[in-house]
Image (cartoon, grey):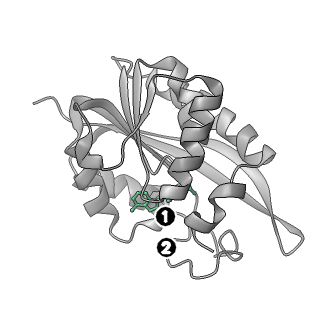
């Protein structure tokens, strides 16, 4: 089942709890850089679980996702909660300004060509801005064992992902563990860990 079909029931209590931890972690990580971002592009924002957690820390978040049903669910949440500084965009090219930070949480393991994905997103990032991913550590395939037709990466080796960042010109790279938990797969708990990786686009 893809994200279009999962959108309606995507949010669960455990994903909400995890998103809160991830949001707090990201804000703490961004504080370690000289300038805290005011504007964010959240790429693959889904139903906005993480977006809604980081939103209060910044002026504006532009949120894009290729799955329209995920975006519809996200828009309902924004309306229900009266959130005004998170702006879903239908087409990434519609973003009205370059941003201080690009964030992508649990999306890049769905993207075949990681370096091409990073380079595409760097077009929207200001010089000196931050590029942050949340990702799964390398996994034996069990994590996505319940996803039919999953053809992405079974998590990432942190060193390999850092090399992709460096090859794309990102500097001052920081990698930190940000979450661990259990996912029930065929009624058995599967333990997994996640990390964040942030790099800075060189000043022009
Ligand atoms: C696992 S969900 C994560 C959603 C959200 N970032 C979070 O952390 O809760 C992955 C999301 O990435 C989106 N996605 C996957 N590949 C994408 C791509 N190439 N471009 C944009 N969105 C993508 C999916 O539609 C889905 O909403």
Residue pictured at 21% horizontal, 31% vertical: 126
- Contact between marks 2 and 1 (CB within 8 A): the answer is yes
Residue 90, placed above or below residue 137: above
Numbered mark located on residue 152 in the image: 2
Position of the N terminus, as image quadrant, is bottom right
Are there few (<14), some (14-19), or many (20+) residues within 10 Å of tag 1?
Answer: some
Check the image and name the residue furthest to the left.
Answer: 204
Position of the C terminus, as image quadrant, is top left
Q: Earlier in the sequence, mark 2 or mark 1?
A: 1
| Residue at the spot of label 1 | 109
Residue 146, placed above or below residue 59: below
> Could you say which is closer to the camera, residue 145 or residue 65?
65
Residue pictured at 22% horizontal, 30% vertical: 97
Taking the image as shown, residue 43 lies to the left or right of residue 13, namely left
> Could you say which is closer to the camera, residue 164 or residue 21?
21
Residue 67 rendering spot, x and y as whole percentages: 48, 59
Taking the image as shown, residue 157 lies to the left or right of residue 194, namely left
Residue 198 rendering spot, x and y as whole percentages: 41, 39
Task: Find residue 16 and report its image quarter.
Answer: top right
Q: Indicate the secondary structure of the residue bearing disc 2.
A: loop
Residue pictured at 50% horizontal, 71% vertical: 153
């Amino acid at each position: 089942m893809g994200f279009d079909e999962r959108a309606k029931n995507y949010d669960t209590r455990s994903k909400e709890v995890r998103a809160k931890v991830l949001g707090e972690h990201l804000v703490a990580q961004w504080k370690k850089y000289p300038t805290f971002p005011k504007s964010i592009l959240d790429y693959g924002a889904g139903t906005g679980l993480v977006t809604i957690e980081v939103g209060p820390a910044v002026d504006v978040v532009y949120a894009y996702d290729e799955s329209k049903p995920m975006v519809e669910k996200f828009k309902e949440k924004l309306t229900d909660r009266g959130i005004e500084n998170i702006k879903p965009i239908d087409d990434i090219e519609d973003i009205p300004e370059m941003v201080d930070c690009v964030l992508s949480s649990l999306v890049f393991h769905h993207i075949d060509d990681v370096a091409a994905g990073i380079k595409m997103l760097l077009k929207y990032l200001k010089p000196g801005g931050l590029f942050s991913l949340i990702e799964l550590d390398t996994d034996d395939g069990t994590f996505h064992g319940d996803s039919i037709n999953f053809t992405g990466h079974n998590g990432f080796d942190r060193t390999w992902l850092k090399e992709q960042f460096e090859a794309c010109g990102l500097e001052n790279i920081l990698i930190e563990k940000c979450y661990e938990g259990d996912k029930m797969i065929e009624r058995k708990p599967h333990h997994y860990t996640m990390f964040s990786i942030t790099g800075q686009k060189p000043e022009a």
